[in-house]
Image: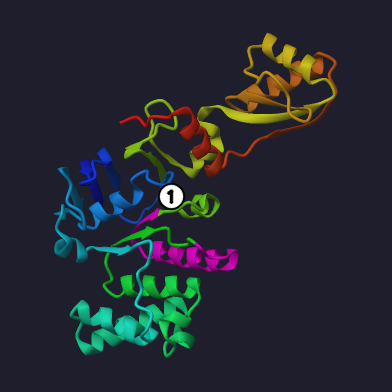
Amino acid sequence: MIVVDAIHKRYPTGVEAVRGLSLEVPAGEVFGLVGPNGAGKSTLLKLIAGLLRPESGQVRVDGEDVTGRPDTAARRVGLMPDPLGVYTDITCHEYLDFFGRVLALPDSLRRERIDEAVALLELEPWMDAEVETLSAGWQRRLALGRVLLSRVPVLLLDEPAAGLDVKARADLLAIVRRLAGTGRTVVVSSHILPELQELADRFGILDKGRWIEVAPGQVYFRRADLTAGFGAASWDLRCDAPDRAATALAARGFAVPPSAQDGVLQVIASDEARASEALSAVVSAGVAVYDFRRRATGLSDLVLRCLEEHPEAKP
């Protein structure tokens, strides 16, 4: 559905925001775009939406070339930017009606699309209220409603849950899940990584305009990769003699950090059978084991590790 081919984008200031970036997102997938501020995430979304013209490379959406062509892209792509830029001195109904007219929707169809968006986003109680009276969470729902009026197959959401409290975040992300369930292709850029981990099917970490490798030769990954630890899962071993346990593990070829934290050793094991060998080695050395469990690898942990290990992002 989305094909980004070797895109380069340099701003007049000389900042090279996107450097030879490629990406393919199949129909119906939710792709999570991760990276620090200034990594190039918003620029990439604007390139996909045709709002920026790259110096080189091409963007195709549903087989159509939308490179630097916002009118063509608008028939296939809806962008919810950050900041939202919502008009505040009109009612919510006027806001949605205005954008329905911008889309040149006939009166009956415009009313139908607005009703659909209002029902999905539960905006009915606010339709006669001025936008400026809405909380940040409801304003974000309203902005998403504007994007939904066009019924485009691709949604680009730039920090959709920024600034929201925990409940408003959960509610908005649940709506995004429902949208993805309708077959839409969704690209979400977010700094709220625990929620993004549950929302997206696949992820990529962007820094300095390039993808960062999460494993040798691999830049994209799925939730299953997080669970599997990319072939080297970590196990926490709590025991009465960490130093003796570390010596026993090293003798059996296990990678163990040089020191324990709070009496807990981190053991690297490729699978459960190998982890069982590690536990057996420690027990055979006469060490009392109090706890031994697999450490869950979260998206936040992975992103921090990758950014620390790759001060310069790889192409």
| Magenta stretch contains residue 249 | no
Q: Residue at x 26, y 37 (%)?
A: 19
Residue 217: percent from left, percent from top: 37, 27
Residue 225: percent from left, percent from top: 49, 37
Residue 133: percent from left, percent from top: 47, 82
Q: Residue at x 49, y 67 (%)?
A: 172
**Residue 203 appears in which quarter of the rendering?**
top left
Circle 1 residue:
201
Q: Could you tell whether 192 is left or right of 12 in the image? A: right
Residue 223: percent from left, percent from top: 49, 44
| In this view, 156 is above or below 95 | above
Q: Could you tell whether 106 is left or right of 236 in the image? A: left
Q: Nearer the viewer, residue 81 or 125?
A: 81
Is residue 81 among the parts visible in the rendering?
Answer: yes
Tag 1: residue type? Asp
| In this view, 89 is above or below 246 | below
**Residue 93 appears in which quarter of the rendering?**
bottom left
| Magenta stretch contains residue 165 | yes
Per the picture, the main secondary structure of the magenta-coloured stretch is helix
| In this view, 76 is above or below 33 | below
Is residue 26 among the parts visible in the rendering?
Answer: no
Q: Residue furthest top?
A: 251
Q: Nearer the viewer, residue 207 or 65?
A: 207
**Which residues are drawn in magenta?**
163-188
Q: What sort of colour scheme is used for the picture?
A: rainbow
Secondary element type, mark 1: loop
Q: Residue at x 34, y 77 (%)?
A: 87
Dot 1 surroundings within 10 Å: few (below 14), some, or many (20 or more)? some
Q: Could you tell whether 18 is left or right of 252 in the image? A: left
| In this view, 3 is above or below 225 | below
